[in-house]
Image: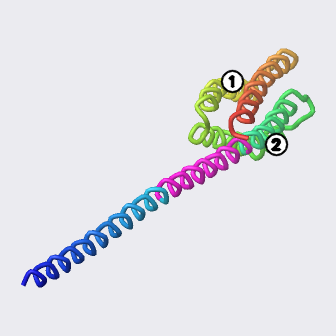
Amino acid sequence: MEEQEHASGTVRSARRGTTLAALGGALIGALTGLAGSVLLYVQADKTQRTTSQARQADVRRAAYAGLGTNFQTFKSEIQGVRNYVTAPVSTQEEREHQYNDRYIPAYAKLTQAEVTVRLVGTDSGKQAMARSVTLRENLRDMVAAAFTATTLDNLKFTKEFNVALMKYEQAINAILDKATEEVL
C-alpha cells in the first residue's frame, strides 16, 4: 500500500512538474510574443513618423518652389506693366492687355503660392511670408495708381517702383534661402 501511495505521489509530482513546465513555457512564449509585438509597434510608429516627415518635407519643397517660380513670373509681368505705363508710345489697349491679361493672372498665382507657403511652411517661413505681403501689396498699389493716373512723373515712378520691387525680391529670396536651410 505504501508503494501505491508512493507511486501515486510520484505521478502527482510528475503531473505537477509537467503542468508547471507547460505554464512556464506558455508564459515565456507570451512574454516573447509581447516583447516582439512591442518592438514591432515601435518600429512601425518610427517608420510612420519618418514617412510623414518626408511627405511633409516634399509638400514644403513644392510650396517654396511654387513661390519662387510664381514670383519670377510676377516680377516679369509687373515690370511689363511698368514699361507700358511709362512708355509714351504704348497704347491704352497695350497697357490694358499687359495689365489684365498678363499681370493680374501672375499676381493671382503669386498670392496663391504665398497662401500655400503660409499653410505648409515652417514657422520661420510663415513669419517671413507674412512680412513680405505688405511689400507685394505696396507694389500692387503703386502699379494700380500709375495705371489709372492721368498724369505720371515717369522718372519718379520708375525709381520708386524699382526700389519697392528690389525690397520685395530681397524678402522673397530671404524666404527661399531660409527654406533651403530648413527644408532641403
Residue 44 on image: x %, y %? 52, 58
The image quarter containing residue 24 is: bottom left
| Secondary structure that dominates the magenta span | helix
Residue 97 on image: x %, y %? 79, 44
Q: Identify the residue at image location x=78%, y=28%.
A: 169
Q: Is residue 80 left or right of residue 64?
A: right
Residue type at mark 1 is: Leu
Residue type at mark 2 is: Glu
Residue at the spot of label 1: 135
Pick the residue in front: 126 or 135.
Answer: 126
Asked whether residue 51 is drawn in magenta, I would say yes
Residue 183 on image: x %, y %? 69, 39
Q: Is residue 6 left or right of residue 114?
A: left
The disc placed on residue 93 is 2
Where's the N terminus, which quadrant? Answer: bottom left
Residue 75 on image: x %, y %? 80, 35
Disc 1: CA contacts within 10 A as few (<14), some (14-19) or many (>=20) = some
Q: Identify the residue at image location x=69%, y=35%.
A: 182
Q: Identify the residue at image location x=78%, y=24%.
A: 170
Where's the C terminus, which quadrant? Answer: top right
Magenta range is: 41-65
Q: Identify the residue at image location x=81%, y=23%.
A: 166
Above or below residue 126? Residue 161 is: above
Q: Earlier in the sequence, mark 2 or mark 1?
A: 2
The image quarter containing residue 162 is: top right
Asked which secondary structure carries label 1, the reply is helix
